[in-house]
Amino acid sequence: MLFNELRKQGKLANKRHPMYEKNKFGKIFGYFMAIFWLGYLIFFGTFFAFAMDGGAIEAYDLLNKGLMIFLVLDFLIRFPFQKTPTQEMKPYLLLPIKRNRLLDFLLLRSGMSGFNCLWLFLFVPFALFTVTRYYWFTGVFTYCLGIYLLMLFNNYWYLLCRTLLSEKIWWILLPIAVYAVLGVVEFTLGNPISTFSMHLGSAFISGNLLAHLGVIAAIACMWFINRWVMSGLVYSEVNRVEDTKVKNVSEYKFLERYGEIGEYFRLELKMLFRNKRCKSSLRSIAIVVVLFSCILSFTEAYDGNFMRSFIAVYSFVAFGTVLLTQIMGFEGNYLDGLMTRKESIYNLLRAKYYFYSILVLVPFVLLIPAMIMGKIALLTAAALTFFTTGFVYCMLFQLAVYNNKTVPLNEGITGRQASGTGFQSLVASAAFGVPMLFYFSLNALCGEVIGQWILMAIGIGFTFTAHLWIKNIYNRFMKRRYVNMEGFRDTK
C-alpha cells in the first residue's frame, strides 16, 4: 500500500508541477526518438543473427562472448539518460514510516524503469532467428529473461556508482578500476571473462535455474549495498549541520572593477564551486571532456572522420548543454532578492554569457594536442568556438524565459521527484544536434574549408550581437516574471 501511495503522489506531483505543460512536447519528441532508436536495435539484432550464422561456433555463443561489452555500453549510456531516483522524503520521515521502506520504493522504481528493457529490442529478434533453431521459444524466453536480469544488475551497479559520484568526484575511480581489472584479466589470462559470459548465456538458453538464481542473488546484494549507501546519504542530507569552519575563501576581488556584472560573475563562480549539485555537474562534464580529448589526441580509437567531428562538437557544447539547461533554476532559490534591483536580471544574464563564453576556451586548449597531430584543424576548432558562443548559447539562453522550477543547490536523494527535464532535454538535444547538422551539411555542400568559414561567420554574427538577443530575452523574462516567480516559489 505504501508503494502504491508513493507512486500515486509522484504522478500527482508531476501533473501539478509548473513545468508540466512545457514537458508535454518534450515527452512526445522523446517518445519519437525512443521509437527511432529501438528500431535501430531491432535492425542490429536481426543483422547480427544472419551475420554471425555459419561460423565455427553458434551465433548465440559468439554474441554471448561479448556480453560484457554490452554491459559496459549499457553502463556508459545510462549516465546522460538516466538519473538517480529521488523522492521528497522529508514529509514522510516525520510520519511513522521506516526510512528503509522509502529507499526500497526508490530502488524498486529504478528497477521498474523501461531503460532496463532497452537491450531486449536487440536480443529478442536475435534469439528468434538463432535460439529457436534448437531450443524453440522456451529457450528464447529463458535467454531473454537472463539478459534482462543482467541489465537489472547493471542498473543497480550504475545507481551505486552514480550515487557515490554525486557525493565525491573521486568515486569515479571505482568503475574505472573495476573495468580496468576485468580488461587486464580478459587479455592477459586467456579470455576467462568472455568464456564465462558464453557459458552463462548458454545456461540462460538451456533454462538452467542456477544461472538465473545466481544473477538474482547478485541483484539482491547490489540492492542492499545501494540501500545502505543511500540510507547514510539521506541521514546526512536531512540532518546536515551548517559548516562554520571555512577552510578556504575565494573572494575573486579582481572582479570588483567590473561593477555589477563582476558581482554576478563572482556569484556564478561561487555557485558552481561551492554548492554540491552545481559542483557535481561541473566536475562530471569536465571529466568527460578531458577524457574524450585525451582519447582523441593520444589514441587511434576515434580516428574516423565522424567520431573526430562528434567529439569536437561535443567538447565545445558540453558545458553549456549540461549547465545552461538549468539557467535561472539555481537562481530560483533567491530570485526574490534579485528582483528588488532594477535590471539586475539583465546583468546576471550578461555575466552568465561572459562566464560560459570563457569556459569554451577549456575544450579549445584541451584539443591543442589533437590540432598539433593533425586530427582536428585549427579552423575547425575556431569555427566551433564561435558557433558555440553565438548560435548555441543563443538557443540555450532562451530557456531563461521559460524555466520556472527551482533547482536545489545541495539536495540529492531527498530532493523533489518531479523535474522539468522534458522541455529542457529537447532544447539540449537541439543544442547538440544543430551544430552537427550545420557542420556536416555545410561541409557536404560547400566543401570543408568554405563550410567551416561559413560556420564561423554564423557564430561570430551571433556572438557580436549577444547584447541584442540577451536584451530580448531579458524583456521577455520581465513580461513573464510573475508567472516564473510563482513557479520558483512553488518548487522551493
Image (tube, rainbow, N blue to C red):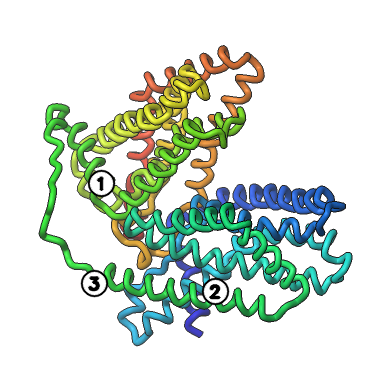
Residue 219: assigned label: 2
* Residue 233 versus residue 376 in the image, above or below: below
Mark 1 surroundings: few (<14), some (14-19) or many (≥20) residues within 10 A: some
* Residue 299 versus residue 127 in the image, above or below: above
* Measured Cα–Cα span from mark 3 to mark 1: 23 Å
* Measured Cα–Cα span from mark 1 to mark 2: 36 Å
Residue 46 point in image, percent of width and height:
80, 52
Which quarter of the figure has residue 174? bottom left
User: Of the residues shown, which amino acid type is indicated by label 1?
Assistant: Phe
Q: Nearer the viewer, residue 248 or 454?
A: 248
Image point 57% across, 49% down: which residue?
25
State whether residue 22 appears in this view.
no
Residue 362 point in image, percent of width and height:
36, 32
Image point 49% across, 72% down: which residue?
222
Residue 192 point in image, percent of width and height:
62, 61
Residue 239: assigned label: 3
> Nearer the N terminus, badge 3 or badge 1?
3
Q: Nearer the viewer, residue 348 or 315?
A: 315
Residue 273: assigned label: 1
> Nearer the N terminus, badge 3 or badge 2?
2
User: Of the residues shown, which amino acid type is indicated by label 3?
Assistant: Asn
Q: Decide: marks 3, 2 in contact (CB < 8 A)?
A: no
Quarter of the rendering occupied by the C terminus? bottom left
Image point 68% across, 70% down: which residue?
146
Mark 2 surroundings: few (<14), some (14-19) or many (≥20) residues within 10 A: many
Mark 1 element type: helix
Mark 3 element type: loop
Mark 2 element type: helix
